[in-house]
Image (cartoon, rainbow, N blue to C red):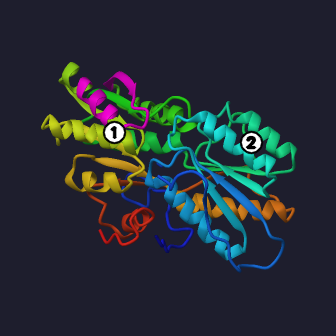
Amino acid sequence: MKIIRQLKMLGVTSLAGVVLAACGASGSSASSSSSSGSSGKSYTFELITKSNASPYWLAVKEGADAAAKKYGVKVNFEAPASGTDLQSQISMVQNATTAHVSGIILAAQNPSALLGPVKAAQAQGIPVVTVDSGISPNISKSFLATSNVSSSAQLAKYVAKKAGGSGQYAIVDFNQEASTGVLRPKGFKQGMASFPGFKFVGMQLSNNSIPTARSEATAFLVSHPNIKVIFGANDRSAIGVAEAVQAQHLVGKVIVAGFDADPGEVNLIKSGAISASVLQSPYQMGYQAVQELKSIKAGKSVPKRVDTPYKIVTQKNIGSPSSIKAIQQYIPNYKG
C-alpha cells in the first residue's frame, strides 16, 4: 500500500472551518523496508505499536517505512495482536533491548508499565521515541502525539452546539490504561463543560471491540432515552456507537462523536451516523519518529514534545481538499 503525501500535510484547525486537525498493522514481527537513502552508518530501529487491530497503526508504519527508505535505515515493525496484550508489548521492548537495536519507536499500551522497559533500553544506550501514547513520567527522548485533551475538547464543543447546547451525554472509551484512553474523555468532558445545559450520564469501556461498544451504546440509549450525544473515544468505539444509533433509528437525533476517522468511520461520517471525528497524523508520527532517532544517533538535539496536527472531519467538510488528503493516510485512492 503506497501512501504519497507531504509531511506537513495537515494544519491544526479551529471549528470555525478554518484549518482544524486512532490505530491495524500486520501482525507481530513484520519487517519494514530499508534502502539506499542518505549515506552514513547503518541503523536498525524497532517500531512497536499498541496493536495490529486498526488501520491507524498501518499509517504509522507507512510513514516509518517512507522515512527508512529516504534515510537509508532499517525499521522492523511488530505489534501485539490485541491492544490489551500488555505483557507481549513489554516483551517486545525487552527483546529489542537485548538485540541492541539502534533505537526504538514505541506506542505504549500502558504509560507506567512500559516505564521500566524504556528505562532499561535507554540505560543500554538505545534511544526511545514515543508516538501517540507515551510513558509516565516522560523519559523518552521525544514524544510525538496529538494533543488528546484539546482535540477532544474541540470535538465536544462542535457536537454540543450541533445537539442544541443541552441534554445528556455519555462516553464509550476503549480503555483506561493507555494515556490516550485517559486523556480523550478528560478533554471531551472539558469541552462539554462549556455547555452547562449538558449532563454527563456515564462512561463504559469497549476494550477495542466494536460489538462491545455497540452493546454499551445500546444500553445507554435504552436507559437514557433523552440522551443527545455519545462520544466513542477511538475508531472501534465510535463505529460501535454509530451502529447502535443506526439500529435504534436515532441517526440525526443522537449525535455521535468519534476519534481516528479511519476507513470504518468514513462512510458513517458521510451518512451522518457519525457527526464528527478527530483525524490525527499517524503517517507523520511514523515518519518524524524515524527522523528524530536518526538525529539522536547523529548527536543532535530533538524536541521533547511534538504536538502533531489533527483535523476534525465532519459530514460537511469530509469532501474538502484538506479532509481528502488527511483520509488518504488510510485510503490512498480516496477522492472524497
Residue 267 or residue 44, whichever sits in front:
44
Q: Residue at x 38, y 24 (%)?
A: 203
Residue 180, how many percent across, how many down? 53, 38
Position of 255 relative to 6 (above/below): above
Q: Residue at x 36, y 44 (%)?
A: 258
Report whether 261 appears left or right of 71: left
Task: Find out whether the residues at labels 2 and 1 contact each other: C-beta distance under 8 Å.
Answer: no
Which residues fall within the magenta stretch?
Answer: 197-219
Q: Does the magenta segment cover residue 89?
A: no
Q: CA distance from mark 2 to mark 1?
A: 31 Å
Q: Which residue is mark 1?
A: 210
Residue type (three-letter) at the residue carrying disc 2: Gln
Choose mark 2 or mark 1, whichever is in front. 2
Position of 6 relative to 93 (above/below): below
Residue type (three-letter) at the residue carrying disc 1: Ile
- Find numbered disc 2 in the image and state the secondary structure of the residue it sits on: helix
Residue 332, how many percent across, how many down? 41, 70
Position of 22 relative to 9 (above/below): above
Q: Which residue is mark 2?
A: 94
Q: Earlier in the sequence, mark 2 or mark 1?
A: 2
Report whether 11 appears left or right of 195: right
User: Is residue 141 visible from the viewing direction of this image?
Assistant: no
Residue 273 or residue 316, whichever sits in front:
273
Label 2 Cα neighbours within 10 Å, binned few <14 / some 14-19 / many ≥20: some
Toward the left, the furthest residue is 249
Which picture quadrant has residue 75?
A: bottom right
